[in-house]
Image (cartoon, rainbow, N blue to C red):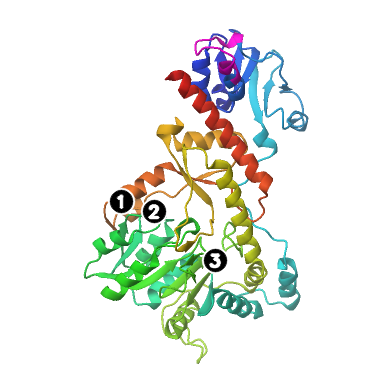
């Protein structure tokens, strides 16, 4: 017997109350065994809910409400034979040994898992990549680099775009090109992926962590203002989970204090602030094309700026610090932060379909919002009136006091139903890597980090997939409501 299935085993004298408490931790089914460990019956959260609605009290023993006729597999059967027994109706399959004792539990998640996000590669990706292979242009030189950069700048509405190996390297190039270095402080949000702070440290500057806005989850301009010192040289606003930062006040602070602004747009391609695309509001915008982003090159990134001088400096630093005017002549100890022609070919094909991808996200979000709007246990994502949120991931905050469980327990129950989720990022200021940074009070960051969860959102998702996620959530929430009402 595995440790996993042990959580699901309960004796026949377990009560409705006992079962509901265990269902907060275990897979969505309880297996009732006799004193010899043999399986006698099963119950899901739906069975428990029906028992309560039919008048069973919380002290009713399992023997009075468990399902005695159930489908099961055998531990000596071929794995495919056991999996074949799983259907939309049979979502939990106990595997029994020769004596009828449970030794494993298969779930519908084993058969049909819904990923958090996955790329869509049904456009010109193959054609463009095959063109690279046929012509031999597979390294960081080749025509698709310039094609991708030009198409990206056109989509953004201007500026000079520069392909990079990742958003992280784009951020690093931006800091270096803008002259940020030793002794300087750079203000970053406390709630973001670690790369935002990593690049500040790599530039020999000091990250200064400030709190986020409770509505948009992006950096709070008031917190920025309170953190500015004579050593502050830059701000990195992060357009988190696809929602743009409130860039007006941020740019005004930058103007007043002569600060540089580097937009971390890793998750926000297509997002807008007051009708302007995020990434071309500050001095430099940096984007990610990792496999889980709106468009992908597998790995890869892009930097964009309206400054020809900054663009030229980033290009030199990206290419080993070499000048274009004299071969193998290094002006700086630069980096190899280049993208390959193969990646750019994929990126160009992806960019051709970006409006399709963003429209798909809009449709998914409307469907999520319509389905989940009636649950006070959930704080749904928002969109400020000045913003276009592209919802990189549909991220919400649970309310444990109403839900009756923690975010992680909620996530585990969705996982057992084949729904992949992800907690939001952890606050950076308390992590070992950033002890050299300066931390301001970040209570909102800490709160959202504890309650935030991202649901499946992607270019390949369908409306039926959203319904499946929401059906699973509905089942969990309704069971919890019944349990809490009976326990009151």
Depicted 39 relative to depicted 109: above or below: above
Q: Which of labels 2 and 3 is toward the front?
A: 3
Separation of marks 2 and 3 at Cα, in angstroms:
21 Å
Tag 3, which secondary structure? loop
Q: Which mark is residue 442?
A: 1
Q: Nearer the viewer, residue 318 or 463?
A: 463
The reply to whether discs 1 and 2 touch (Cβ–Cβ < 8 Å) is: yes
Depicted 429 relative to depicted 110: above or below: below
**Residue corresponding to mark 3:** 270
The reply to whether discs 2 and 3 touch (Cβ–Cβ < 8 Å) is: no
Q: Position of residue 73 (x, y in %)?
A: 73, 23
Left or right: where 131 falls relative to 169: right
Q: Position of residue 85 (x, y in %)?
A: 76, 28
Q: Which mark is residue 191?
A: 2
Membership of 336 in magenta stretch: no
The residue depicted at 46 percent of the width and 85 percent of the height is 308
Tag 1, which secondary structure? loop
Separation of marks 1 and 3 at Cα, in angstroms:
28 Å
The residue depicted at 67 percent of the width and 58 percent of the height is 120
Q: What's the magenta region? A: 50-64
């Amino acid at each position: 017997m595995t440790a996993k299935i042990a959580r699901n085993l309960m004796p026949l004298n377990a009560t409705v109350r006992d079962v509901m408490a265990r269902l907060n931790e275990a897979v969505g089914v309880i297996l009732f065994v006799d004193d010899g460990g043999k399986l006698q019956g099963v119950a899901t959260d739906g069975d428990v809910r029906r028992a309560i609605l039919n008048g069973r009290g919380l002290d009713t023993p399992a023997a009075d409400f468990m399902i005695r006729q159930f489908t099961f597999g055998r531990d000596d059967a071929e794995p495919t034979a056991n999996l074949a027994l799983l259907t939309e109706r049979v979502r939990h399959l106990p595997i029994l040994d020769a004596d009828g004792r449970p030794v494993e539990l298969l779930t519908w998640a084993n058969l049909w898992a819904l990923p958090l996000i996955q790329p869509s590669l049904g456009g010109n990706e193959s054609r463009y990549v095959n063109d690279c292979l046929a012509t031999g242009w597979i390294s960081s030189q080749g025509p698709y680099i310039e094609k991708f950069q030009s198409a990206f700048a056109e989509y953004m509405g201007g500026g000079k775009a520069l392909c990079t190996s990742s958003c992280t390297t784009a951020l690093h190039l931006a800091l270096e090109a803008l002259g940020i270095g030793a002794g300087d402080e750079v203000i970053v949000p406390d709630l973001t992926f670690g790369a935002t702070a990593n690049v500040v440290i790599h530039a020999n500057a000091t990250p200064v962590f400030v709190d986020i806005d409770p509505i948009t989850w992006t950096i709070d301009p008031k917190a920025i203002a309170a953190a500015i010192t004579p050593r502050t040289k830059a701000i990195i606003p992060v357009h988190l989970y696809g929602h743009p930062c409130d860039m007006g006040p941020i740019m005004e602070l930058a103007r007043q204090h002569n600060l540089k602004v580097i937009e971390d747009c890793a998750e926000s391609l297509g997002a807008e602030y007051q009708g302007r695309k995020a990434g071309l509001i500050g001095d430099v915008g940096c984007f990610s094309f990792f496999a889980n982003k709106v468009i992908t090159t597998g790995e890869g990134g892009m930097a964009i700026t309206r400054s020809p001088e900054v663009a030229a400096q980033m290009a030199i630093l990206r290419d080993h610090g070499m000048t274009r005017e004299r071969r193998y002549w290094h002006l700086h100890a630069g980096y190899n932060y280049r993208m390959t022609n193969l990646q750019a070919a994929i990126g160009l094909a992806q960019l051709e379909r970006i409006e399709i991808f963003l429209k798909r996200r809009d449709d998914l979000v409307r469907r999520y919002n319509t389905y989940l709007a009636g649950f006070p246990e959930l704080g749904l994502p928002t969109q400020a009136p000045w913003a276009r949120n592209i919802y990189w991931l549909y991220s919400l905050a649970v309310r444990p006091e109403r839900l009756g469980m923690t975010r992680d327990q909620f996530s585990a129950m969705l996982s057992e139903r084949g729904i992949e989720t992800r907690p939001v990022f952890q606050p950076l200021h308390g992590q070992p890597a950033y002890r050299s940074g300066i931390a301001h009070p970040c209570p909102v960051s800490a709160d959202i980090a504890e309650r935030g969860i991202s649901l499946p959102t992607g270019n390949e998702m369908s409306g039926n997939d959203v319904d499946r996620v929401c059906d699973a959530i509905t089942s969990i929430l309704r069971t919890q409501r019944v349990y809490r009402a009976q326990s009151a």
